[in-house]
Image (cartoon, grey):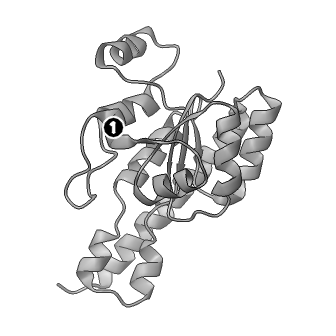
C-alpha cells in the first residue's frame, strides 16, 4: 500500500525542503507540530496540526502533544488484523504510514552545561514513543530518524509506487532501536552523575 499519511516533527530541518514537496507529489497527508509545521508551510506545503487531527490540544508546555490513541493507534495497528481495523473505524483512527522524527538534542544540551531543570525538559518522551511504535510495526510503517535516509526513502517510494520495501523498513527499525538505546544511555549517564 502506498504511504498515505505521515507525521513529521524534526528539530533538524536539513533535507525537508526536498522531501516535503516530494511527499506532496504522492499526495501524502502530513501531520506536524510547531516549528516543523511552520517550516513546511513556509515552503508552501500544507500540513495538519496534530492537535487538529487528535481533537486534543497540546498541553503542559508541550510535554503532551503526540501522546494520544489517534497517533499511536494509527502507527501500531496491524493492517491485516480485522479486530485492529474495527477498532480503528470505531474510534475514528486513521493509519499513519510514515514517521519522520528527530529527538530532542539531550546530549548537546547537557554538553553546553545547562541546568538540571533544562536537562530534564530536554528528555524527549513523545518522539521516542512514536519512533519505537513505528519500529515495532515496521512491517507496515516506515520510520526515519536520520536525514541521511531521505534520499533512500524517496528512491524506495519512486520504485514502489509510493510504498517502501520491507527490507528498507526493517533496516530503519533497527536504526531506531539503536538510537533509543544510545539516547536512554546518555540520559542515564547524566542522571547517574547528577546531584539534586
Question: Which is more toward the observer, 100 or 194?
Answer: 100
Compared across the picture, whether 187 is left or right of 12 comes to left
Query: Element type at marker 1?
Result: helix
Question: Which is more toward the observer, 173 or 41?
Answer: 41
Where is residue 108? Give x, y as percent: 47, 79
Residue 61, compared with residue 105, is above or below; it is above
Compared across the picture, whether 157 is left or right of 135 comes to right
Residue 92, compared with residue 157, is above or below; it is above
| Residue 171 appears in the rendering | no
Question: Which is more toward the observer, 22 or 169?
Answer: 22
Where is residue 93? Give x, y as percent: 37, 23
Quarter assignment of residue 161? top right
Where is residue 37? Give x, y as percent: 47, 52
Q: Which residue is drawn at 38% across and 36% down?
A: 71
Q: Residue at x 51, y 33 (%)?
A: 137
**Count of numbered badges drawn on the protein:** 1
Q: In which quarter of the image is the C terminus?
A: bottom left
Which residue matches tag 1?
52
Q: In which quarter of the image is the N terminus?
A: top right
Q: Which residue is drawn at 59% across and 29% down?
A: 139
Which residue appears farthest toward the bottom when viewing the image?
A: 113
Compared across the picture, whether 60 is left or right of 88 comes to left
Residue 102, compared with residue 91, is above or below; it is below
Question: Which is more toward the observer, 112 or 185?
Answer: 112
Q: Which residue is drawn at 38% across and 42% down?
A: 50
Compared across the picture, whether 195 is left or right of 37 comes to left
Label 1 crowd (10 A; few <14 / some 14-19 / many >=20) = few
Where is residue 151? Give x, y as percent: 76, 51
| Residue 18 appears in the rendering | yes
Amino acid at each position: 500500500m502506498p504511504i498515505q499519511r505521515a507525521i513529521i516533527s524534526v528539530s533538524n530541518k536539513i533535507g525537508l525542503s526536498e522531501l516535503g514537496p516530494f511527499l506532496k507529489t504522492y499526495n501524502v497527508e502530513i501531520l506536524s507540530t510547531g516549528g516543523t509545521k511552520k517550516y513546511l508551510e513556509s515552503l508552501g506545503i500544507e500540513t495538519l496540526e496534530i492537535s487538529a487531527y487528535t481533537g486534543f490540544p497540546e498541553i503542559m508546555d508541550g510535554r503532551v502533544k503526540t501522546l494520544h490513541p489517534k497517533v499511536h493507534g494509527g502507527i501500531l495497528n496491524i493492517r491485516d488484523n480485522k479486530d485492529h481495523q474495527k477498532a480503528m473505524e470505531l474510534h475514528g483512527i486513521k493509519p499513519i504510514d510514515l514517521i519522520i522524527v528527530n529527538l530532542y538534542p539531550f546530549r548537546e544540551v547537557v554538553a553546553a552545561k545547562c541546568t538540571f531543570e533544562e536537562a530534564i525538559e530536554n528528555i524527549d518522551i513523545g518522539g521516542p514513543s512514536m519512533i519505537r511504535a513505528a519500529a515495532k510495526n515496521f512491517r507496515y510503517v516506515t520510520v526515519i530518524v536520520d536525514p541521511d535516509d531521505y534520499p533512500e526513502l524517496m528512491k524506495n517510494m519512486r520504485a514502489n509506487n509510493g510504498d517502501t520495501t520491507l527490507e528498507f523498513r526493517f533496516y530503519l527499525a533497527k536504526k531506531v532501536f539503536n538510537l533509543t538505546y544510545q539516547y536512554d544511555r546518555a540520559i542515564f549517564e547524566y542522571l547517574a552523575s547528577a546531584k539534586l
